[in-house]
């Protein structure tokens, strides 16, 4: 996941270079960025969940890593001199001219990569939920997410430097090639893991439970999930929360520039503390959740912090344009970005049947991907509508779009509160620790002995 998240954002700091070198306008760049979620939104993620529950972690993990490498190679080819300027490029550029041929082909590669990346995400979540059942599950998931956040931080720092690594003119090819090689290394590592895992199964005679018969998955389970109120509460909380997080990461630099009157570099330097805060806090918060519980409360607190931060960006920062205020708000938003993911993903196995855990994760990701695909477009339209006649990109008024993010936070908070109320009434265990205490285990054992 570290390499995958690096690849996701490898071109984010190179937007200007792509415009100069390959003629990608901001619209072309936006379309390319949205392509990551396109095939997932149109159903791939649902299929991915079924494949995961039917075929298991080893097969799905290898397939997802291969899709990521395949998509990455197409994207690398699209921006390389091997493609740019060829007859194929000429033909691709000749229709829908707002998107140059290289942007279209790179978007196709990114779509395929996005399928692999989200498929890997659900595979990892299901694997951790299985391996750490009754143990430090939230800590394990927190460490996985922290690695992913480190990947974002690493690529924002590395990508601009790698683009200059060969001397001479800066190049977009070098950073993308570097991250493609990392993905290939990731695929090889996963294949080695599957071989070792299979060998261990054979030696111990214990199945990994990948597709055991007592846990057989049925297609009707997917329909059942769609009819589950709890599923919808979690999925809607997830889409609303993340729609105010990942799109913010993309637009945040310019928002800070406009409010503070600073350069893109200074704004990016402020914004990169956002994943860093989450990186440092997600594992310890996961550990606390494992030990002491309070998952639903963490979701409420994280949503409250999200609302507060976006209100500051919308209303206070334009009136008090202080870099310290911006940094403090970014750090608090980082705390929120640690609280909610640390509590949300480990809550899923508590309320969903293990048999269709892969499908549950994939359907939640699917609903989330609809938001991640649509919200940046909505955000761009709200920004444009609120700034009619503004041509200087340093002069945008971000109040309305940031209020929109705060509104998503309010809705997420309502779902988090609903979840807590349901948990209090129906005892799903969302507020309970993941690690069963010795006394609880002894009590459970005594109970089953009596039976
Ligand atoms: C674990 C969780 N991952 C997701 O929510 C992914 N579906 C979306 C990742 C988007 C990266 N472009 C997370 O990262 O908190």
Image (cartoon, rainbow, N blue to C red):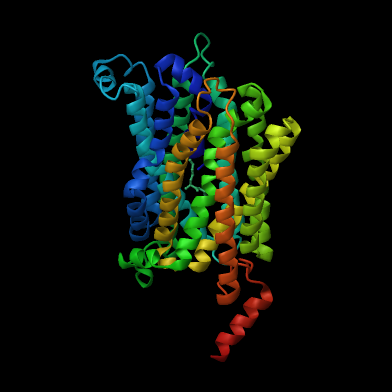
Q: Observer-nearest residue: 192 or 81?
A: 81
Residue 330 visible in the snapshot: no
- What percent of the width, then of the height, locates residue 12? 51, 29
Q: Residue shown at 75%/33% (left/top)? A: 324
- What percent of the width, then of the height, locates residue 435? 63, 67
- What percent of the width, then of the height, locates residue 164? 54, 16
Q: Residue shown at 67%/31% (left/top)? A: 270
Residue 115 lies in quadrant = top left
Please determine whether, in this image, residue 105 is positioned above or below residue 359. Answer: above
Please determine whether, in this image, residue 189 is positioned above or below residue 440. Answer: above
Instruction: Please count the marks in the image.
Output: 0
Residue 303 visible in the snapshot: yes
Residue 77 lies in quadrant = top left
- What percent of the width, then of the height, locates residue 160? 55, 22
Q: Residue shown at 71%/33% (left/top)? A: 319
Relative horizontal placement of residue 443, taking residue 8 as reference (left or right) = right
Relative horizontal placement of residue 151, taking residue 174 as reference (left or right) = right
Please determine whether, in this image, residue 14 is positioned above or below residue 308. Answer: above
């Amino acid at each position: 996941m570290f390499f995958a998240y690096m690849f996701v954002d490898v071109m984010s700091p190179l937007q200007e270079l792509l415009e100069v070198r390959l003629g990608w306008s901001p619209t072309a760049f936006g379309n390319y960025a949205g392509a990551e979620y396109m095939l997932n939104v149109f159903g791939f993620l649902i299929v991915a969940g079924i494949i995961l529950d039917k075929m298991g972690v080893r097969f799905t993990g290898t397939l997802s890593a291969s899709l990521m490498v395949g998509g990455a190679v197409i994207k690398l080819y699209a921006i390389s001199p091997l493609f740019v300027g060829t007859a194929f490029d000429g033909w691709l550029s000749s229709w829908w001219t707002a998107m140059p041929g290289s942007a279209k082909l790179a978007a196709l590669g990114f779509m395929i990569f996005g399928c692999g990346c989200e498929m890997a995400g659900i595979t990892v979540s299901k694997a951790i939920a299985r391996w750490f059942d009754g143990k430090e599950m939230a800590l394990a998931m927190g460490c996985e997410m922290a690695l992913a956040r480190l990947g974002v931080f690493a690529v924002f720092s590395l990508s601009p430097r790698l683009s200059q690594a060969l001397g001479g003119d800066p190049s977009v090819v070098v950073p993308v090639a570097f991250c493609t090689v990392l993905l290939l290394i990731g695929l090889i590592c996963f294949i080695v893991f599957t071989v070792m895992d299979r060998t261990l199964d054979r030696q111990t005679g214990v199945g990994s439970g990948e597709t055991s018969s007592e846990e057989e998955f049925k297609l009707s389970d997917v329909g059942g999930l769609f009819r589950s109120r709890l599923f919808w509460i979690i999925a809607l909380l997830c889409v609303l929360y993340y729609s105010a997080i990942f799109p913010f990461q993309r637009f945040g630099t310019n928002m800070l520039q406009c409010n503070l009157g600073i350069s893109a570099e200074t704004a990016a330097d402020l914004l990169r503390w956002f994943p860093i805060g989450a990186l440092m806090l997600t594992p310890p918060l996961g550990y606390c959740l494992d030990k002491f519980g309070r998952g639903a409360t963490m979701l409420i607190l994280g949503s409250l912090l999200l609302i507060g931060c976006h209100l500051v960006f919308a209303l206070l920062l334009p009136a008090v344009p202080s870099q310290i205020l911006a940094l403090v708000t970014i750090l608090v938003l980082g705390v929120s970005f640690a609280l909610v993911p640390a509590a949300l993903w480990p809550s899923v196995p508590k309320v969903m049947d293990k048999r269709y855990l892969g499908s549950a994760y994939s359907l939640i990701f699917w609903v989330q991907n609809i938001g991640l695909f649509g919200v940046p477009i909505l955000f761009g339209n709200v920004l444009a509508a609120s700034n009619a006649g503004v041509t200087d990109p340093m002069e945008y008024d971000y109040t309305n779009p940031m209020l929109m993010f705060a509104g998503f936070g309010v809705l997420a908070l309502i779902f988090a509160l609903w979840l807590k109320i349901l948990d209090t009434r129906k005892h799903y265990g969302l507020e309970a620790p993941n690690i069963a205490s010795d006394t609880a285990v002894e009590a459970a054992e005594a109970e089953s002995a009596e039976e």
